[in-house]
Image (tube, rainbow, N blue to C red):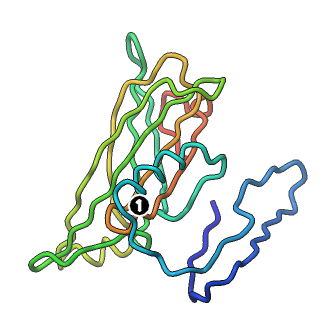
Amino acid sequence: MLGFYLTAVDSKYHELKVSVARPGVTLNYRRGYYALDEPKIDTAQKKSDLSSALLNPVDSGAVGIVATLDMQPGSPRNTANVRLRLDPDTLSLDKNGAGWTGKVEEMFVELNSAGREVGRISASKAFDVTPTTRDSYEVNGVALLQSFQLAPDAVKLAIIVRDSASGRTGTLSVALNAVTPSSARQ
């Protein structure tokens, strides 16, 4: 995964170009972006943005996501244990007493080979950062866990995380056939 962070807001369109020297590699990336101030987004717009993230074939890095999947064999269905680590530079914190709090909304959407939704799990998770844990937060980000049984015909998992305060959304797609019953990392 390759990412970058905006350093200046100039309200202009900036083209992105990514290339690799390895033959046969297919790249999926945004072709550009507008360097605009982030406006406050209302609740209806946030819901719409979360749904539209599902339709976008290119993963978004507005919230940085690293996911580790552990598949546990089960009957009648396998269980996915999804551990997320979220980039602290892409999350919002609110001052709360002596520390800070943040909140994210997660959605895990299972897709079959035809690209149709066969399962969905949603959750909101709040996290606290204390003065003692602030240095660790700045280095490691936020660690979250979600476990759920997979639909029998699921072949792809779309992970969508939205920062509740800013509305920034990150997505990550994982091909489930690439995940073995032992620990795998995407």
Q: Give the image location of residue 145, x and y in percent.
A: 32, 45
Q: Amino acid at mark 1?
A: Leu
Q: Residue at x 62, y 84 (%)?
A: 11
Quadrant hosting residue 167:
bottom left
Q: Residue at x 35, y 30 (%)?
A: 148
Q: How many marks?
A: 1
Q: Residues within 10 Å of mark 1 (few under 14, many from 20)?
A: many
**Please, is residue 158 above or below residue 23 in the view?**
above
**Please, is residue 112 above or below residue 147 in the view?**
above
Q: Give the image location of residue 55, x and y in percent.
A: 60, 43
Q: In this rendering, would 158 be left or right of 28?
A: left
Q: Residue furthest top?
A: 76
Q: Residue at x 58, y 32 (%)?
A: 156
Quadrant hosting residue 128:
bottom left
Q: In this rendering, would 128 be left or right of 79?
A: left
Q: In this rendering, would 24 be left or right of 16?
A: right
Q: Residue furthest left?
A: 97
Q: Nearer the viewer, residue 35 or 125?
A: 35
Q: Residue furthest right?
A: 23
Q: Give the image location of residue 65, x and y in percent.
A: 48, 57
- Mark 1, residue position: 86
Q: Nearer the viewer, residue 169 or 45?
A: 45
Q: Residue at x 64, y 65 (%)?
A: 2
Q: Secondary structure at mark 1?
A: strand
Q: Quadrant of the N terminus?
A: bottom right
Q: Give the image location of residue 20, x and y in percent.
A: 83, 63
Q: In this rendering, would 42 be left or right of 55?
A: left
